[in-house]
Image (spheres, grey):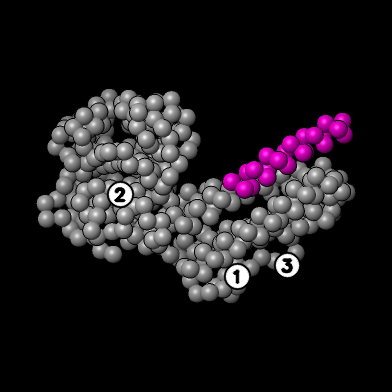
């Protein structure tokens, strides 16, 4: 799994500003330095100390974009977080990235990183990805948005979020000539978390802990909806609640299967991941509107929790499960909201 050090190190600029996403800096930088590449951190002020938005990484820059020339580098990395929105108002940084693209340098941007490329008018006609909140911004800049872990368009590499980091970093290393040492980024059968762990991403224990939280949440939500389905009289709503139960059972099995690949079989049964026998929020009221409102809250929580957790895990396989949970819960929330609003109107 070790990436062979380069005999002729390439010079890599990593652009930074306050509130960068910690792991989006840490993972590629660790991998590149391990591979023997010369990583140079460029900020906007030499006297500044740059802090990650998670508070885990603090970095002093090696130089600034105003004093540096893109032609002196082989590649430029743009981490995400809140930093790119600050980078895009720095004329020196915008000019630096324009010069890098004009010089056919490798440019790799993750999460909100493409915001800098939007500002520099570099995305027209490009295939890219990025954090989903900037999808419309990317499309309005003339790019074609592709919802995949990594998108490569010639010398431009983009990814969506921290869970993509092992594959994003592998794509960078491959482009720089280390392809013989790591799997191809398209190989989704690989346990990419192992590379993420090696490069300062989350370790297996942290990934397992996150999956355990998701498993308990899905088990709790399943039991709650089994209870709701027994208490609701409206046939449409009951049918939807039963659909929620079915999808939650599927989610539970997917999470167990993933956990059993990471740890010993049935680890979840002996590790305190089992939920209580009774649902925590069982409903006793005869007010069906109130019950539906409670169920809406449960689905909203499922959406937010799955999204938040899935964005953090540097394990693409686990993140894919959480993305599925988020999508299913979101669709069910929207359907229940329609039924709730219809019933609310009928009762007034």
- Percent position of residue 188, x then y: 41, 56
Residue 171: mark: 2
Whether residue 264 is situated above or below residue 299 in the rendered picture: below
Q: Is mark 2 on a helix, strand or loop?
A: helix
**Residue 128, image quadrant:** top left
- Percent position of residue 178, x then y: 22, 54
Q: Distance between the residues labelled 3 and 1?
A: 13 Å
Which of label 1 and label 2 is nearer to you? 2
- Percent position of residue 323, x then y: 53, 49
Quadrant location of the C terminus in the rendered image: top right
Q: Distance between the residues labelled 1 and 2?
A: 38 Å
Q: What residue sits right under mark 3 in the picture?
A: 277
Q: Is mark 3 on a helix, strand or loop?
A: loop
Counting residues from the start of the chain, the first of labels 1 and 2 encountered is 2
Q: Distance between the residues labelled 2 and 3?
A: 46 Å
The structure residue drawn at horizontal position 69% and vertical position 49%, both measured from the top left corner, is 298
Q: Is 327 on the left or on the right of 286, as rendered?
A: left
Residue 272: mark: 1
Q: Is 122 on the left or on the right of 55, as rendered?
A: left
Counting residues from the start of the chain, the first of labels 3 and 1 encountered is 1
What is the span of residues highlighted in magenta in the rendered image? 327-348
Which of label 2 and label 3 is nearer to you? 2
Whether residue 47 is situated above or below residue 29 in the rendered picture: above
Label 3: few (<14), some (14–19) or many (≥20) C-alpha neighbours in 10 Å: few
Counting residues from the start of the chain, the first of labels 2 and 3 encountered is 2
Q: Which of 147/290 is in front?
A: 147
Examine the residues drawn in magenta and state their main secondary structure: helix
């Amino acid at each position: 799994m070790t990436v062979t050090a380069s005999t002729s190190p390439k010079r890599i600029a990593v652009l930074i500003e306050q509130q960068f996403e910690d792991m989006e800096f840490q993972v590629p930088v660790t991998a590149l330095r391990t591979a023997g590449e010369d990583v140079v951190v460029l900020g906007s002020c030499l006297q500044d100390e740059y802090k990650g938005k998670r508070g885990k990484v603090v970095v002093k820059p090696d130089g600034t974009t105003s004093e540096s020339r893109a032609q002196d580098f082989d590649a430029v990395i743009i981490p995400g977080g809140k930093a790119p929105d600050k980078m895009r108002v720095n004329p020196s940084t915008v000019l630096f990235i324009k010069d890098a693209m004009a010089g056919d340098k490798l440019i790799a941007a993750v999460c909100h990183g493409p915001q800098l490329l939007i500002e520099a008018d570099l995305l027209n006609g490009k295939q890219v990805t990025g954090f989903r909140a900037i999808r419309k911004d990317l499309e309005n800049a003339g790019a074609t948005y592709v919802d995949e872990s990594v998108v490569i368009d010639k010398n431009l590499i983009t990814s969506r979020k921290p869970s993509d980091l092992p594959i994003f970093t592998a794509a960078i290393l491959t482009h720089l000539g280390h392809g013989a040492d790591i799997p191809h980024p398209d190989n989704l059968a690989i346990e990419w978390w192992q590379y993420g762990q090696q490069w300062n991403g989350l370790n297996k224990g942290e990934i397992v802990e996150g999956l355990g939280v998701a498993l308990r949440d899905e088990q709790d939500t399943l039991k709650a909806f089994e209870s709701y389905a027994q208490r609701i009289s409206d046939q449409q709503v009951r049918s939807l609640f039963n659909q929620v139960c079915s999808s939650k059972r599927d989610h539970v099995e997917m999470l167990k299967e993933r956990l059993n690949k990471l740890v010993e079989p049935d680890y979840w049964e002996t590790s305190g991941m089992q939920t209580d026998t009774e649902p925590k929020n069982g409903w006793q009221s005869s007010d069906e509107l109130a019950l539906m409102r409670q169920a809406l809250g449960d689905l909203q929580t499922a959406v937010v929790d799955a999204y938040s957790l899935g964005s953090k895990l540097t394990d693409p396989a686990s993140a894919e499960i959480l993305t599925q949970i988020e999508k299913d819960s979101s669709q069910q929330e929207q359907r229940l909201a329609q039924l709730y609003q219809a019933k609310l109107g009928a009762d007034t």
